[in-house]
Each structure stands twice: as C-alpha cells, then as structure tokens.
Image: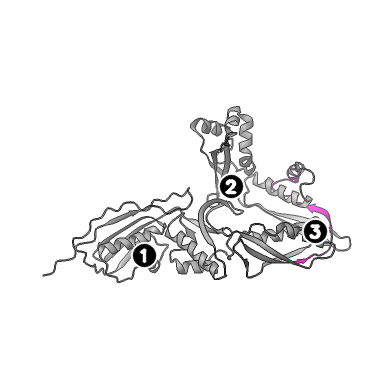
Amino acid sequence: MNKPAAPIAAFLLLATLQFSSPLSSSPLAPAQTRTAPHAQKAGPKSIRFQGAPQYTQEELLAAAGLKPDARLPPAEVKLHAKQLNDTGLFAVVKFSSDSKGLLFTLTPSTQLYPIHLDNLPLKSGEGPGNPLNDKLHARFPLYHGLLPASGSMVEGICRTFEEMLATQGIKATVKAALTSGLGPKKITAVDFTVASPPVRIGSIQLSGVSAPMLPKASQLVASLTGNDFDTENSTIGLRHAFENLYQDQGYAAVHVDVTEIEPPAVSDQAIQIPYAVAIKEGGVYKLGAITYPSDALVPRTEVQKIVSKAPAGSGRPLDLFLVAVGDAYRARGYLDCAVVPNPSFNEATHIVNYSVDVTPGAIYKMGTVQFDGAGDAMAARLKAAWKLAPGAAFDASYASGFAALAQKKDKVLAKWMQTVITTYEVKADPDSLRVNCVFHFARAAQGGR
C-alpha cells in the first residue's frame, strides 16, 4: 500500500530591501520550513496566486518559472517561491497547499519606482505601446512600468539593456541606482546608466544657417560637442540652446529641429551620439508690448516687482517676465500653473508683441515638514523657524529660501548649518493637493591635512 504524500508545509519568505541605499542584492531572510520525509512530487489540481491582482495568473506563472499543471516536490516549490521573492516586487511571498492545489499568497511591495534612463542611447518613452516598455514586459512578465529598488528584475534589466546596446555595436556596462530629483518633476526613480565607456554628444551637423549667424552657431557647436549625453534631455537641450542663440539676436520666429543620427560612433574611449540640427531662421524682430490678463489672479504689479529684482542683463525681458509670472503663481500654491506666450508678428515694422495666457490649476496646501539628519535640539529650532502652517497655500519660494532664512533668524542654527550640507525635497501629491517637505542634513566632509 502506498503512503500518501506528506502535505507541503507553509513557507514564508521575507524580502528585506534598503531603498535609501544604492542598488545591491538583498539577502533573503532565513527560511523556516518543514520538509516532508519523502520528497514525493505533489500533484496539485491547480497553481493559484492571490494578493497581487495587478498581475495576471499567466504573468505570475511565467515570473515564477512554473507551468499550470506542474507536479513539484516541496524543495522545488521553495525555489520557485524564491524566484518570485527575488524580483523585489513582493514584500512577502507565502505558499501552501489545500484541497484545490498549490496556493501562493503575495504581498506586493509598496516601494516601487518608475524607470529612468540616464545616458543610454535608447528611446525611453512612456506608457503602453512604447517599444522599450513592450520589450521589457516580454522579457520580464511582471514589469508594468514600475520597479523595486533592487532585486533580480533590476539586475536582469541591466543585462537586457547591455544586450540591446550590443545589437547597435555598443559594448557597455549598465548599472542601476535608486536616485532622487530626476527630471523637471524631481522624481525618484530607478536610474539606469552606462557606467563605461562614457556617452557623449558627438558631431553636430548644421543646416539652414545664414552667413551672419554662422560664426555664432559654429561657436555654439564647439561648446556642445563632447558634453555628456542625456537620454531624455540632450535633444531638448540642443534645441533650446540654438533657439536661445537665435532669440538673443532677435530671431523671434526661429524654428529648430534636432534629430539623432544613427548609428552612434563607438570606440573603446567613448560612445558619441551625432546630431543633425536644421534651422529655419525667420526674420529679426524687436520686442513690442507684453499683454497680461487684467483679471489674472496675480496682479501685474506683483509680477513686475519680481522682475525688478532680476540683475541687469540676466535674461531677455520676455523670459524674465514669464518666469516672474510662474514664480508669483507658485508662491500662492498654484504649483501646476502653465504660462504660455502667444506671439503676434508685425512684418511691416518687424515688431513682435506677446499676449500671455495663464492657466493656474488647483491650489496646493502645506502638509508636513521633516528635518532628517538634524538632532533633536536642531530639529526643534528648525520647526520653530518654519512658519508655513499646515493647510496654508503652499509657497514654493518659502521652501527654497527657508535654509537661508533660518540662518538669519537663529545664530545657533547658522553656526550648525555651516557644518552640514542641506538639501530638500518638495513632494506634491496631485490627488490630495498636499505638499510635504523633507529637508536633509548631511555632515560636510572634512578636508584632510
């Protein structure tokens, strides 16, 4: 008579991740198991997953390396559970058997971050239908645009990027790190970087440049060639650089197109990304009037007061005015305000007038403020110095100027803050319209003798 197979004991895997540290492989917590005396294969009626509805059963099976009707001994089940755990996507992975078969109970991690490409010569893009996201999802079934700070998935994506670069003739080492303050929205993301060789802006081919502008354009090309390449910002940065060059000379209607030229120039010393810059100069115009809405939430007098504080020669009058409008609105809590200049060209007089449209958006309110890295005594002084009350309209300029203001008001704080490096984060939640501020204080490095 055959003995019945011993039931598979419940197994708990705890993933411990240090999200504030650079990426590294995190150790798995010791497993507490009871193994059946005979490693007989279990024949579950089904393999099921619960606790992670954002993933399909097919995606979870693939990520765990399982087939729906697999017959597995306990030791193999543990290995597949570990495979899920090692992705870093789950805080807890449990498995057990019941009358229906094998059941995995998952607790998804709450610490997941978007992907960011630092200097990889690949097109990143966003959202569904993006070829890069589609390729990553095909290779990593649980990739839905967010990643843990570390784990097998992050390591696997590094190797995948290396393989993708290799198809372009680029032999590179890709590394990943959890990084804050990325992009215009200052997001925290898992940042993928080509660690070696360096990636730089290569040759820049110009077209459409007139003889009077050629010396200045050539000088700009020389200053940009060889700069560090940025996946998201190099193309935009080149366009802005040439637009600014022309607008400084009065070419208010200039149009600049920037495109990467393939393939990149690859050597052991560097990866160089060449560009083509096509320019439609238009005519030269003088600035006329800047019309501002008379019913704007922020009066023009307040905007002009900000403009008047700008040092002489610090920028074009239109740019200074637009920046001042944005600053004035953000000081009242309108963090999402959009300021759009609409040009009107007079070809007879070669004068350009602008009307300014402002879409303020919603008002953000102050939430909490934290002072990380400050001892109890200094944190108490900092809290006393902070005057922006919870629920008040958030003033972005107050947060940016707080460190300097605190030092002026408190000599003890001023002396202590000279010994630390101060950084801060503004965390605005578009759903709750609350803003939490976190100030970080790190001991400044002491110079060696």
Amino acid type shown at disc 1: Ala
| Closer to viewer: mark 3 or mark 2 | 3
To which quarter of the image does residue 237 belong?
A: bottom right
User: Quadrant of the rendered structure where residue 396 is?
Assistant: top right
Please name the residue that numbered disc 3 is placed on.
216
Residue drawn at x 36%, y 53% is 28
| Foreground disc of the pair 1, 3 | 3
- Left or right: residue 50 compared with residue 177: left
What range of the chain is rendered magenta?
A: 277-303
Query: Which residue in the protein does label 2 denote?
Result: 364
Give the structural element (helix, strand or loop) at label 3.
helix
Based on the picture, tell me whether residue 295 belongs to the magenta stretch. yes
| Residue 368 in view (yes/no) | yes
Quadrant occupied by the C terminus? top right
Instruction: Decide if residue 343 is in sight here.
Output: no
Task: State yes or no: residue 410 in magenta.
Answer: no
Q: Which residue is mark 1?
A: 64
Give the side of residue 310 with respect to residue 74, left or right: right
The mark that comes first in sequence, 3 or 2, is 3
Q: Residue 155: where, in percent of width, then height?
A: 46, 60
x, y percentage for residue 42?
24, 67
Binning the other alpha carbons within 10 Å of mark 1 as few (below 14), some (14 to 19) or many (20 upward) gives many
Q: Nearer the viewer, mark 1 or mark 2?
A: 1
Q: Of the residues shown, which amino acid type is indicated by label 3?
A: Lys
Q: Which three-letter amino acid code belongs to the residue tagged 2?
A: Tyr
